[in-house]
Amino acid sequence: MQDTLTVVLAGGMGSRLSPLTDDRAKPAVPFGGKYRIIDFTLTNCLHSGLRRILVLTQYKSHSLQKHLRDGWSIFNPEVGEFISVVPPQMRGGGAWYEGTADAIYHNLWLLSRSDARYVVVLSGDHIYRMDYAEMLKEHKENQAKLTIACMCVERHEATAFGVMDTDKDGRITSFVEKPLDPPSIPGDPSHSLASMGIYIFNMETLLEALTEDAKIEGSSHDFGKDIIPRLIDSKSVYAHNFCNDKGRVAKDCYWRDVGTIDSFYQANMDLLEPIPPMNLYQKDWPIRTYSSQNPPARTVSSATGNEGIFINSIIASGVINSGGSVQHSIVSSNVRINDSATVVDSIIFDDVDIGEGCQLINCIIDKHVKIPPFTQIGLNRIEDAKRFHISDNGIVVVPESYEF
């Protein structure tokens, strides 16, 4: 893969995921009790043989940069491998990135000095597993200038995506970003073919397209809105069907944009299904992350004789459950659950102390929170709304380092 450069867009503000993104970039938000969101994209790169990676950061990137330093300093620059964090260089006159395409345009000097023939453009804020090598192989076989990964979605959900039409050979004939009336798949009126925001460009095609776009007044400098529709009329642009992928990863066809509190919560809860829709346990495709050196999780009998109980939950290292009950929840590292506390249908981030007799239901507790004894969260929406953010589906979010 020495002829391929990968660019991961990781500068998004993620405002719809507030307050989890109030002090961190969206790709750095914890997920699944152990990971960060960006780990899924980077793991796909690792197993796909893509080891020349630029991570473009911008918004509140310290947590993300620290995670990449601690967990992803694994490539060998002596053989041309790297993960390089690239904050805004202000080469475009001092402006911040204004769109997905603009972020790469501001770093064209990095691309142009590369000897790569192909550029893989990825988002650092989606949850999925994919073998990009299979998509790149298909891109070369089709002699495409641009290949877009796509998947079939319900037509009523397609308004949130770029939607495309293809001919019988898979060549894209039209592309509309977030249409109010999405075109359906021929012969299947209830479904549409949606872009996943995963692109493979020929280097010269990308350089030319971004340079031209920068000259267009009023452009939003976005791949879906501006770059792709213009390329379809003049270049060979193909679709790669994610669900028909022939790569080494398990064919679970799972992809989630965890851009809201409710979608983030549901994607976590998906991991607790008897047969999860995304398989984290494929031995030749493990999800890599930074893991701190913690003792094993354990349960303890409390002084009152209560046994610590975990039921259908994901429990990270360093957790101590001293007489509490945890059901259908995800508990991250170094969490302490005290006597008679109950945690149900909830996500607990690192270093949280849940006091005696607390009741937590349908909530997300961010890092470094000490919850006083007998506190109730998720049981009284009116009271919760006075101090916490509540999602449309009623998920209560306690922000990082909140003091009661």
Image (cartoon, rainbow, N blue to C red):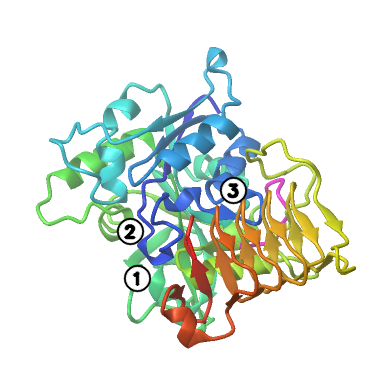
Residue position marked by numbered label 2 in the rendering: 224
Cα gap from disc 3 to disc 2, whole angstroms: 22 Å
Query: Magenta region, mostly helix, strand or loop?
Result: loop
Q: Is residue 120 visible?
A: no
Cα gap from disc 1 to disc 2, whole angstroms: 9 Å
Image quarter hosting the N terminus: top right
Residue position marked by numbered label 3 in the rendering: 40
Q: Earlier in the sequence, mark 1 or mark 2?
A: 1
Q: Is residue 159 above or below residue 330?
A: below
Taking the image as shown, residue 316 lies to the left or right of residue 75, namely right
Residue position marked by numbered label 1 in the rendering: 178
Labels 3, 2: front one: 3
Residue 127, image x and y in percent?
57, 56
Specify the quadrant of the image occupied by residue 305: bottom right
The extreme left residue here reads 217
Count the numbered circles shown.
3
Residue 184, image x and y in percent?
45, 78
